[in-house]
Amino acid sequence: MLAFAGLWQLLTAYKVRFWLRFDQLPTAVEVGEALVRRIGTDEYWHDLADSLRRIGCGFLLAALLGVAAGVLTARSRWAADLLGPVLELVRPIPAIALVPVAIMLFPENEQGIVFITGTAAFFPVLVATRHAVRAVPPLWEEAVRTMGAGRARVLWSVVLPGALPGVAGGLSVGLGVAWICVISAEMVSGQFGVGYRTWSAYTVLDYPGVFVGMATIGLLGRVTSGAVELLGRRLTAWLPPTGAAAPAATPTGPAEVRT
């Protein structure tokens, strides 16, 4: 990071123009000074709280609905035939393209932004969960069924734990997509938040302020993504370490059998 900041400072301070035009960008020092000024204002922290609240509500809804829909479509042929075509038709539509729909559907911008954020994160979670559930070895289910377990017990004791690694990956991807869309939605229709403040800085040609917003978005995304990854590791702590050697088989020769 220090090397990146140093290179940025050199290219912008000397206004290098070699295919890319660094003479139009603020220097790293100017961005750092702007960041220090912004951190000292209440407005900065209110924007952080607004964006975190929106991402939290939208991502929580996406996680719950995405996991539920993924398990349902993977385990039920009826649900796959009924919901699958609709979901696959809507999935390629960029979430940010739903801004006009959100404006017409919801009476307040806040609800629309949460809707866009949740929709963006829903589909990565759905697809990851669906593939993870289908990848659970059938032998695991058969082993539990031979001991008298019903469908509910198989789901909670075998399918969901077995699919957790894939679900955790989908949650991590979904969170990244959610950040992209919440910032974009704030720029288009928000009144508060990091995305709105970044766009406002651009409209008044406050380029250091734009980079302050970008740095803040990156930091928030890294922190929240790290939290989701940590949660995923905690939930899958029972898995063997990656690359761990399998236990050696115990030889059973004729003499041992006779014994």
Image (cartoon, rainbow, N blue to C red):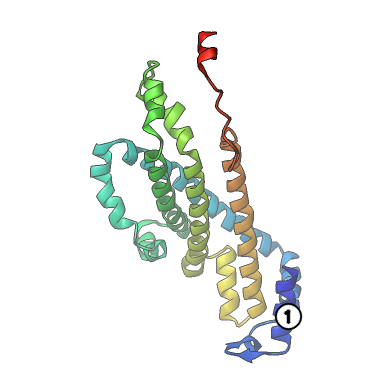
Query: Which residue is found at the position 55% from the left and 27% from the top?
Result: 249
Residue ID for mark 1:
9
Residue at (46%, 56%) from the top-left corner?
117
Q: Position of residue 99 (x, y in %)?
A: 40, 64
Q: Position of residue 127 (x, y in %)?
A: 39, 49
Q: Is residue 48 visible?
A: yes
Dot 1 falls on a residue whose secondary structure is helix
Report crowding for label 1: few under 14, some 14 to 19, many 20 or more residues within 10 A (C-alpha): some
Q: Which residue sits at x=38%, y=66%?
A: 97
Apparent side of residue 119 relative to residue 60 in the rendered image (left or right):
left
Classify residue 242 as left or right of residue 131.
Answer: right
Pick the front one: 64 or 70 = 70
| Amino acid tagged 1 | Gln
Compare residues 62 and 136 and report the one nearer the observer.
Answer: 136
The one nearer the camera, 52 or 168, is 168
Residue at 56% in and 80% down: 203
